[in-house]
């Protein structure tokens, strides 16, 4: 029993001091990735999250699917899904949760953090105070946990603000912006008319419904709106839509999205319950008779509040022109996506999205405060203009950049540096190399890893695929849209393509060979050659031999233009680095086949050629007279772990008939080996939305599941079964000395050959 007499003095809650190497505030995807990255390299991390679960807007509390550069596979950003730690999380979620249950995704994130013994995780713990030192650094962050009535005082030499609203950065006095800049400040043509369009993006609140199998009535609460049928957005509603498909239920851009957040939420509740009243009781949705509300969000998904200033500010031209900087550490590719401030009440379209031709780099200088010396920035609060923020704000882009923050914190700890110090040209390479070793895939950045013993090895393969086409199957596709086979072609060479069509009647078919105007993107905006073919009714073999050549090595697009009277024969074979795309529409991301923005906003016009999700998206049963030698073993040593737009697959691929392909890495003398890393193809072109949508497979079919590694004496040093991750890191218990490593792979998919992007070998633990 506890009994305590009356006290005339104020009682103080239990207070616990916490000392660590890094304090991360905010447990969304960004905070999770920053914390795990730092912890895996030995830093002691305190992770403070003010909600009962991790994930932020991706959690079961909000239920927004996490997306990034792939943009629902609705843009021209091929093989652009974010790599590294966030990709590991996505693949784990796919394995356990391909249906997209947000509750399961909660557990995936919680487990990832729980497994890191260097992380002290505090949920339901909100930071409310900051102490600064005289040296312009954060000394402590004070937080209160509502569930255990405990105050925590967290101190560390380094802090990372990933809180969404920037509570640490704000309270410590860091310079910030909130709202839209004028067009003139950064020469941004897409900057909105603030008076009409508004300053800020609003919050959204979602709901789920379910069919209970019998009619069920609904009485709306008194606070629900009574005029839902008058909402400009109500035309967007389709019965059966729930969760984040209701992103357009948005409000708050005219208000203070921080201090009036609760007011915004209550207005969204009024709207949600009013919409459901309209659906159930207006008589316009008789098929809703058996439906009931299963879940309504209790906290809204917040899009925008403060953005803090770093030593660099990302702007519209960086995105449109795919500018590269010496300190690139991450990338983005979502459209510049702005919403009218009046949200669901606005007369404007629900959003205005303009895509770039390709992915853009994000400099490291965006990820720390230019005022507070020991403060990293992660998530949507990084240094960006309002327009650029419209792209960089999405969760997978935020999480990918947060891995750079976590890795930078490691270097700061190891070398006694502050965040700004790493931005120097002498230090930034250390960060970039550490990130790329873990699959960050910083675009258009060529790095040499002098510690990688595999680069010095002679590599031999049991077989290597020389691509001369895809085997035909009895599957045909009507050309409802233009269909293109993407293949990497060389400059100044001509090619011959053979394929089979079935014409429903005599007609003409236009063929084009397209390429891209720059090696920074995969947008087919240049016609290299074209030809019009007269077709007779029925099946026939067509040959297209080019007479013109492209000026640079590049991925090219062999295009069969739209003709609904024609079918083309397909193949069941799928090969790393080769795919088809269509000139089709994806309204979910404002893709209508092409974009033609107003000239004054300074955004490019171009066509969209985008993929279909499996099991669709098959390759054309194409034959080429000259085999393409695009899968050589030397690709394993070039440091790349996905195809890039300069025309390299960056993969070794075995012959499709080779059921147990092998790779031998040989050295002239024995080398010491402690760590081995393998990088497999996890189909970086497939968007892996975490929630709601669901996916056709729980394992990406290109990933090698089973393999053995043997030393020069034939001893098995590692056997792996059931792998589904892109990156396998093998830390040997004891270092070995050998002049040879043999990798024996098992082919599991009949129509997919074994492929590997990269093998790295080190003589130390990484």
Image: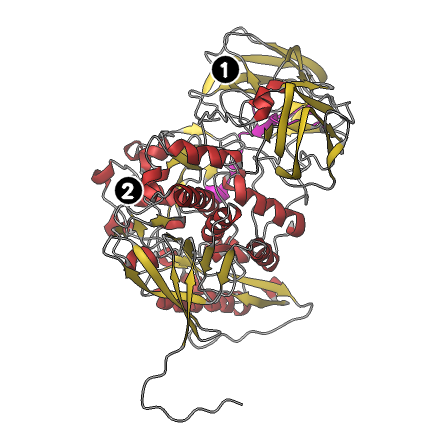
Using the image as rendered, state which of residue 85 and residue 692 is in the foreground.
85
> How many angstroms separate mark 2 from mark 1 (CA)?
36 Å
The answer to which of marks 2 and 1 sits earlier in the sequence is 2
The label shown at residue 553 is 1
Q: Secondary structure at mark 2?
A: loop
Q: Which mark is residue 191?
A: 2
Residues 205 and 238: in front is 205
Q: Is residue 6 visible?
A: yes
Which span is picked out in magenta? 561-589
How many C-alpha atoms fall within 10 Å of the one at disc 1: few (<14), some, or many (≥20)? some
Query: In the rendered view, does 664 fall on the left or right side of 421?
Result: right
Question: Foreground residue, 177 or 151?
Answer: 151
Q: Horizontally, is 17 left or right of 92 in the view?
A: left
Residue 664 lies, with reference to residue 339, above or below; the image says above
Does dot 1 land on a helix, a strand or a loop?
Answer: loop
Residue located at (61% from left, 20% from top): 457
Q: Is residue 192 left or right of residue 436?
A: left
Name which residue lies at 34% across and 61% down: 140
């Amino acid at each position: 029993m506890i009994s305590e007499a009356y006290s005339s003095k104020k009682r103080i809650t239990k207070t616990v001091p916490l000392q660590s190497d890094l304090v991360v505030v905010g447990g969304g995807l960004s905070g999770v990735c920053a914390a795990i990255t730092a912890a895996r390299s030995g830093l002691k991390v305190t992770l403070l999250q003010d909600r009962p679960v991790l994930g932020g807007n991706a959690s079961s509390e909000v239920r927004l699917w996490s997306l990034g550069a792939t943009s629902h596979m609705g843009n021209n950003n091929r093989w652009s899904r974010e790599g590294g730690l966030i990709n590991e999380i996505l693949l784990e979620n796919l394995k356990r949760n391909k249906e997209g249950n947000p509750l399961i995704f909660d557990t995936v994130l919680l487990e990832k953090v729980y497994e890191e013994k260097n992380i002290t995780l505090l949920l339901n713990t909100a930071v409310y105070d900051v102490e600064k030192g005289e040296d312009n650094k954060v000394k402590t962050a004070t937080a209160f946990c509502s569930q255990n009535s405990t105050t925590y005082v967290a101190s560390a030499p380094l802090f990372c603000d990933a809180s969404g609203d920037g509570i640490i950065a704000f309270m410590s006095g860091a310079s910030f912006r909130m709202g839209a800049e004028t067009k003139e400040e950064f020469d941004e043509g897409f900057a909105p008319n603030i008076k009409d369009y508004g300053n800020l993006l609003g919050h959204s609140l979602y709901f789920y419904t379910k069919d209970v199998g019998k009619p069920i009535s609904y009485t709306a609460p008194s606070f629900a709106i009574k005029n839902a049928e008058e909402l400009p957005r109500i035309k967007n509603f389709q019965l059966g839509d729930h969760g984040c498909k209701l992103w357009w239920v948005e409000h708050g851009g005219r208000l203070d999205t921080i201090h009036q957040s609760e007011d915004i939420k209550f207005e969204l509740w009024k709207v949600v319950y009013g919409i459901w009243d309209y659906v159930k009781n207006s008589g316009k949705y008789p098929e809703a008779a058996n439906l009931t509300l299963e879940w309504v969000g209790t906290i809204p998904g917040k899009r925008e509040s403060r953005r803090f200033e770093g030593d660099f500010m990302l702007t519209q031209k960086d995105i449109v022109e795919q500018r590269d900087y010496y300190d690139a550490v991450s990338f983005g590719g979502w459209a510049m996506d702005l919403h009218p401030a009046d949200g669901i009440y606005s007369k404007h379209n629900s959003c205005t999205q303009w895509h770039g031709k390709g992915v853009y780099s994000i400099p490291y200088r965006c990820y720390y405060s230019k005022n507070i010396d020991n403060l990293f920035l992660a998530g949507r609060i990084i240094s960006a203009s309002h327009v650029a923020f419209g792209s960089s704000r999405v969760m997978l882009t935020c999480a990918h950049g947060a891995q750079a923050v976590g890795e930078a914190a490691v270097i700061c700890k190891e070398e006694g540096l502050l965040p700004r110090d790493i931005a120097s040209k002498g230090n930034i390479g250390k960060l970039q190399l550490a990130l790329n070793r873990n699959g960050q895939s910083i675009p258009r950045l060529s790095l040499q890893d002098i510690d990688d013993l595999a680069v010095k090895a002679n590599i031999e393969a049991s077989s290597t695929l020389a691509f001369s086409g895809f085997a035909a199957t009895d599957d045909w596709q009507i050309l409802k849209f233009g269909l293109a086979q993407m293949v990497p072609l060389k400059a100044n060479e001509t090619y011959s393509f053979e394929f089979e069509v079935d014409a429903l009647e005599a007609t003409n078919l236009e063929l084009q060979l397209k390429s891209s105007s720059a090696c920074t993107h995969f947008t087919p905006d240049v016609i290299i050659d074209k030809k019009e073919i007269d077709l007779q009714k029925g099946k026939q073999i067509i040959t297209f031999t080019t007479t013109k050549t492209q000026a640079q090595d590049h991925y090219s697009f062999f295009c069969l233009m739209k003709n609904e009277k024609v079918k083309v024969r397909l193949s069941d074979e799928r090969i790393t680095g080769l795919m088809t795309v269509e000139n089709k529409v994806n309204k979910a991301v404002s893709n209508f086949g092409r974009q033609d923005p107003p000239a004054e906003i300074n955004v490019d016009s171009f066509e969209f050629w985008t993929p279909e999700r499996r099991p669709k998206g098959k390759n054309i049963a194409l034959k080429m007279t000259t085999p393409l030698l695009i899968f050589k073993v030397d690709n394993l040593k070039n440091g790349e772990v996905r195809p890039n737009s300069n025309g390299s697959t960056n993969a070794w691929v075995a012959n499709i008939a080779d059921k147990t392909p092998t790779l031998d890495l040989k050295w002239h003398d024995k080398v010491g080996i402690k760590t081995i890393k393998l990088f497999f193809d996890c189909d970086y072109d497939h968007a892996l939305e975490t929630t709601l949508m669901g996916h056709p497979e729980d394992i990406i079919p290109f990933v090698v599941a089973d393999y053995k590694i043997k030393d020069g004496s034939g001893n098995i040093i590692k056997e792996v079964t059931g792998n589904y991750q892109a990156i396998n890191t093998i830390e040997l218990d004891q270092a070995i000395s050998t002049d040879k490593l043999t990798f024996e792979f098992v082919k599991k998919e009949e129509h997919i050959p074994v492929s590997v992007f990269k093998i790295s070998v080190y003589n130390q633990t990484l």
